[in-house]
Image (cartoon, coloured by chain):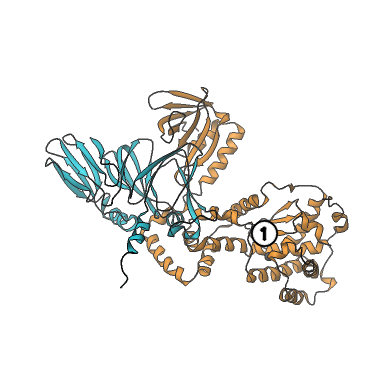
Amino acid sequence: MTRQTRFAAEVFGPWAKGQSTAATIDIGTWLVVTLDGGRRLELPLASLKISRGGFDLLSVVLAGTATNGEALHVIVHDVSVLAALDQHGTHAMRAQAATVARSHSRGRIWRWVASPGAVLLFVALLAGAWLGLPLLVDVAVDRIPVSLEEELGAASVESIVAGQPVLEDGPVHAAVKTVFDRVVLGVGATPYTFHLTVVDTPTVNALAAPGGQVVVFTGLVFEVESAEELAGVLAHELRHVTARHGLRQLIRSGGVVLAIALCFGDVSGLAVLVKTLGDMSYSRDAEREADTGAVAILRRARVDPTRFREFFARMAKHGSSLPAILSTHPQGDERDASLRALTAGATSSDWDPITVDWAAVRALKAPR
Amino acid sequence: MRFEILYPGSYAMAKATLAQDEQFRAESGAMVAMTSTVDVEGKMEGGLWKALKRKAVGGESMFMQTLKATRGPGEVFIAPSTPGDLALLELNGANNYFLQKEGFLAAESGVTLETVSQGIFKGIMSGEGVFVQRVGGQGKLLVSSFGAIHKLALAPGENYVVDNGHLVAWSGTVTYEIKKASSGWLSSATSGEGFVCHLTGPGDVYFQTRNAASFGQWVASFIPAR
Ligand SMILES: [Zn+2]
């Protein structure tokens, strides 16, 4: 199949700031730019950086340096230029083009907003806004596909990790992964694929991000006294994920307009908020639900659910130097009592031990 | 034909010089004076539904005027209804501009005009409305501002934050995003939830030195409550 290789473009070069020059581009082994007026510039295809840009990020931006040394930004409004780059480019370029093409497909979901029916519905929703944000958030959450939630989750984990060391293998990672996999068994049917990220910092914390993401800091790994204690915390975070607590909180923090926009399928506002996910705490109701869910998950995975409460009770006795996990999960008497009630009646015949020697894991803690 | 901006500043006006049979389009009601060789034709661009939609969603007038020098060469003076400046933008067939809903004043006949949605979230948070106008094609375009008009020429990757309600026009190559404002950013009513417009080059951005909504509030503060 022969693909189109010639496209109309706007070119920004060192000759004018802010004002583009109309051009035609040809894609082959080189990117050949013919400016209006006839001047011809050539760029090696392999050196191009491809990104999105322009109104609603609907255009493709090719940035590179021409053989004469001029830095060029070539903007193509026809996205089929990506297919041409995919055909002629190097392996790395094809990967770039594919990534950009994927991100493109999202932008226009909400185009139908301009239809008359949508305008009426919009007015109706504005009225609905008076009914309250929580109701609107419920509707909005339901409209978000899992695939988008996964993208959001991955992006927010990136911003949470932000340059901190991440463990991808080694005995500590392996131990956490063993516990994690065991707990996931108890989740049951779910649309999510769960991802574990182990961050190697002394923070005593774990958190959940949308789309199946759980982040554990090694500070917590070395603080817990058994695999079961960690399992409890992980189960709690997994329940936050499956109940979409993070997503709900994210939408809530965006206010009424974001929620209304989401009800219409306009997801552009979500990306704006990803960065705020890291420092988020959930409502008391969400925490209660996560605790209840965690105990259910642990029981299904045949993991001792009582140790989890003990961990929090022990942490609460730390006094002045409370770990991070307690600032988002205060262990009041009420929580302690409800966890005790949830785990009442469990006997050792209901669970099988997680076969990780936790004392050996804690011995791996590097002196700081 | 030729557009010329007269009295640049707060009370700018434009003069269009037409050869016989040349024509251009202007916002309805923009005509101030003209030679008797020119005919004015009010017409609904794109039919009734599109005109209604523009009126309902864009807040602009339902009718555009076509001014044609039917009986010999002519001159037309046009001006926007609010005090403010004018800027002349050029479309070369490859580029686009986006205009906030009240930005359009007049254009040569080769310029195309289309109402597009920028999404509810962006529309409300930016204070520019859900619908903006995309202009393309070939020819010259006059945009009007409230207050003076300032042009920023952004290099690739160059970043600017513009307060809500101040954008007049921007190149289609400019990436314009709504972002959460850093704390301490105090702004007009629409950014109450803490969002501002981030613009990234390359491209030109035209913004106005006054915000119509804020001005309205200021005027209202002098009207005694009954
Ligand atoms: Zn929690």
Which percent across, then down, holds residue A96? 58, 38
Which of the two residues, A63 or A150, is positioned nearer the viewer here? A63
- Looking at the image, residue A174 sits to the left or right of residue A97; the answer is right
The chain containing the residue under callout 1 comes to A
Q: Does the residue tagged 1 have its C-beta within 8 Å of any atom of ligand 1?
A: yes
Q: Quadrant of residue B190?
A: bottom left
Q: Taking the image as drawn, is residue A146 in sight? A: yes
Which of the two residues, A180 or A155, is positioned nearer the viewer here? A155
| Colour in which the image shows chain B | cyan
Q: In percent of the image, x 34 and y 51: which residue is there?
A: B101
Q: Label 1: which residue?
A: A208
Q: Quadrant of ligand 1?
A: bottom right
| Colour in which the image shows chain A | orange
Q: Is residue B86 above or below residue A121?
A: above
Tag 1: amino acid? Ala
Label 1 secondary element: strand
Which of the two residues, A144 or A191, is positioned nearer the viewer here? A144
Q: In percent of the image, x 40 and y 60: which residue is there?
A: A118
